[in-house]
Image (cartoon, coloured by chain):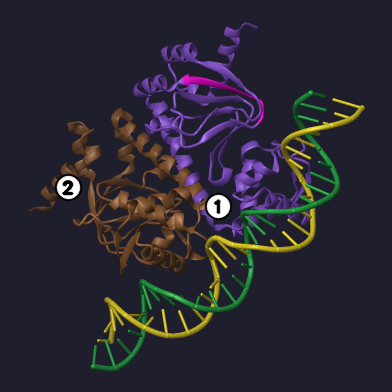
Chain colours: A brown, B purple, C yellow, D green
DNA sequence: ATAAAATTATGCTTTAGAACATGCAAAATT
DNA sequence: AATTTTGCATGTTCTAAAGCATAATTTTAT
């Protein structure tokens, strides 16, 4: 299959949410300016303080949006799965990125110049609503995260992180095993705790038969209990 | 002065950012549907889990957006001054409010039905961009807040909160005294700490001649030092 | 004005979770 | 296969900040 037809396939099938909102002329513009890039595991896609130029669309793989904090402590802000868009917030805010994005596993990402996206939005109210909706959802999520990460105790934060992983990536065919395999350090970075405490608390959950742990393979045994722990704090 | 002319004055002069983006017909719609409400000190404007119906525009006073957390612990998310808009995020996200808004001091607030705002946005790209920009700025702010509130130490968090107050409300005519007088509890709720620690740390800053404290009157003596403390952590 | 309530100020105690250290296991690299 | 690196697990120590108690001061209500 030629590169062009591959791209067209990707663009037409995978741009999903956005694609269906475009008219023929807009689709042509997008197709002509869309580029696919591959990133290796742990490769940085963009970094804090960079100037935003592209709309990124995750086509394959998993991407984390994170912020480097004090003493190299990383906080994961959001996780992306195909087909999701990211990297547009900073452009819309007319400021450099305040967070970084990197590939969790080998990933394929499409780019579209934000200048083009801006032009299309100017004539396409549906696309404007798409971004207004996305930004609004994300803002609600971040506001909520501020409180849970600062006020919940370790067990509550880890339970919440596991639920986030369920909601974001779901289960393998067994309906129990999390469809993401991340280092304990990343679990910690998601839940605002040290790696040691992520390990300890995962072990505790396993002991209590809430989950089972086999290396990076995490099985959710008692999701109800997990949600209960997450709610208390 | 009649109520109508008062409203017209308010609408035309104070809707500021939004007003100038509207055409004659839109201005008429807004004027016809705009209502002014007064809130007493500490009165709740809307509460978490309510359904969003209005765009709120702060005309006079000060408003805090906050979330009630564990054990009645409150986290202040954002502060508003005239003329700023709030309460639209949840509507755009098609979900109930995830935070509450209350008047810090006696305040006048204008309302516009979100259904109307939505209609106007549909035909007014400038207004769409206004909200996209606001949401994007706020999201960047919340993402940053996640890290500072979870990773910085008490002194850093308090310093940051004081800088936020400077940026939001500025100084009295002396160029030193913060133009907001809030309870220590609210200072604490802004900086993710207990009231005791807010008091203690304010005292420490006063001892170090970074600020002076006289009741709720806070004078910023050494803003550079404050920014330095905020940066370190 | 006076009482009652809320807020501010400080000292003392407790604790959740970070920091550190060590051992082991599993990959990856040679 | 041997060696280095990386990640996981667990125990111990330490500390920042919460929790609690009490008193003084300020604000609010009657």
Q: Quadrant of residue B36?
A: top right
Q: Name the chain under label 1.
A: B
Q: In terms of image quadrants, where is residue A27?
A: top left
- Where disc 2 sits, the SS reads helix
Whether the magenta-drawn stretch holds residue A84 is answered as: no
Rendered residue at 71%/39% (across/down): B178
The picture places residue A104, in percent across and down from the top left corner, at 31, 60
Tell which of D15 and B162 is nearer to you: D15
Chain part drawn in magenta: B105-112
Count of numbered labels shown in the rendering? 2
- Which quadrant would residue B43 be assigned to in this image? top right
What main secondary structure does the magenta stretch of the protein show? Answer: strand
- Residue found at the very far left of the displayed protein: A1
Q: Secondary structure at mark 1?
A: helix
Mark seen at residue B149: 1
Q: Which residue is mark 2?
A: A10
Could you classify mark 1 by the number of other residues whose Cα lies within 10 Å: few (under 14), some (14-19), or many (20 or more)?
many
Task: Report whether residue A142 is seen.
Answer: yes
**Apparent side of residue A78 relative to residue B220 in the rendered image (left or right):** left
């Amino acid at each position: 299959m030629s590169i062009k037809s591959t791209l067209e396939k990707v663009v037409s099938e995978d741009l999903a949410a956005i694609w269906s909102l475009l008219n023929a002329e807009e689709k042509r513009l997008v197709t002509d300016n869309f580029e696919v890039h591959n990133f290796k595991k742990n490769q940085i896609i963009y970094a804090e303080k960079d100037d935003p130029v592209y709309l990124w669309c995750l086509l394959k793989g998993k991407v984390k949006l994170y912020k480097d904090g004090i003493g190299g402590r990383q906080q994961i802000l959001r996780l992306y799965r195909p087909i999701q868009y990211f990297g547009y917030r900073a452009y819309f805010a007319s400021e450099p990125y305040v967070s970084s994005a990197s590939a969790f596993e080998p990933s394929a990402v499409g780019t579209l110049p934000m200048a083009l996206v801006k032009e299309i939005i100017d004539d396409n109210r549906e696309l404007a609503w798409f971004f207004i909706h996305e930004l609004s959802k994300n803002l609600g999520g971040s506001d909520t995260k501020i409180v849970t990460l600062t006020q919940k105790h370790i067990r509550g934060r880890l339970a919440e992180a596991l639920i986030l992983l369920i909601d974001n990536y779901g289960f393998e065919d067994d309906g129990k095993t999390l469809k993401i395999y991340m280092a304990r350090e990343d679990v910690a970075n998601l839940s605002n705790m040290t790696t040691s405490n992520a390990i300890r608390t995962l072990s505790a959950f396993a002991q209590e038969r809430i989950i089972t742990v086999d290396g990076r393979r995490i099985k959710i045994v008692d999701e109800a209990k997990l949600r209960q722990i997450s709610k208390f704090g």
